[in-house]
Amino acid sequence: MDIRKPDNALKFKNDGMINSLYICRDGQNIITGDSNGYLKTWDIRAGSALQSLLNESTKKPISCVAVSKRGHGNDEEPRYMAVNSYDNVIRIYDRGIEPPKTQLKLIHILKGYKNKGWPIKSSYFFGKDYQYSTQRLTYDIYDDSQMDSADHVVYEKDKPLEASLLLATGSADPYAYLYNVGGPEETGELIQRLEGHTDFVYAVDFHPFEPILASCSADCIIKIWAPNAKGKKKG
């Protein structure tokens, strides 16, 4: 908005309903995901789309665009982007070394969750010590502290959560899903299904710099999931 003018300073016309958007750190570009299955990068100054990418060939709607924001005051433009689609697939894109100028590259395809017909959202956890590597992390991650048989994180001492890149997503079933997306291309994998809700999980969100996850559901409950650093199960 330009407060000096009575109307909107800028207006963009898209050919489909926009379901999700992300404003780039430079303040000059906006990325949208729409009902026609397109990811578009809009130039605010030009008032038009700079890039347009079809997420998948059957043009299923996109429900969420999430980026791998690094916490601790880091203001770099996030490199990785997750796109939830109505085809029950999350696609992870590498945005390159100079996003949003560089082209998107598909690096992971994640399956196992349900998205068709519902506005499901996802969220990244970007560990402060994460560096892209060929190592694969193994986890048995979360459950909320209110449950009697809570499953907690189990990880090797030399591969802590702080060195990981994770993606959590809601689902059109009573679960949230957790994926490891920090390894090499095509190694993204489901590492845990989080059980505890009794209806669709519409959205999840990670703490800005801690591996603490919130999930919200059609069961009218918000759950907070926290890891057990000792790698033990609560009994």
Image (cartoon, rainbow, N blue to C red):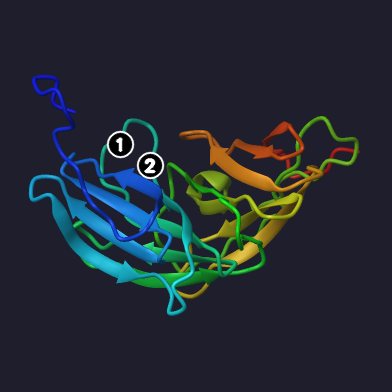
Q: Is residue 201 left or right of residue 109?
A: right
Is 3 in front, or is 169?
Answer: 3
- The quadrant the N terminus occupies is top left
Q: 192 or 86: nearer the eye?
A: 86
Vertical comparison of 160 with 208: above or below:
below
Q: For marks 2 and 1, give the CA distance.
A: 6 Å
Amino acid type at mark 1: Asn
Circle on res. 88:
none
Pointers 2 and 1 in contact (CB under 8 A)?
yes
Q: Position of residue 5 (x, y in %)?
A: 10, 23
> In this orientation, which residue lies closer to the viewer: 9 or 99?
9
The residue carrying mark 2 is 70
Q: Residue furthest top?
A: 4
Q: How many neighbours does mark 1 have within 10 angstroms: few (below 14), some (14-19), or many (20 or more)?
A: few
Residue in the image at 72% along x and 48% along y: 200
Q: Which mark is residue 74?
A: 1
Q: Please, what is the three-letter code of the amino acid marked with disc 2? A: Arg
- Name the residue rendered at 28%, 56% in the picture: 14
Residue 213 at what x, y percent from top left?
A: 61, 38
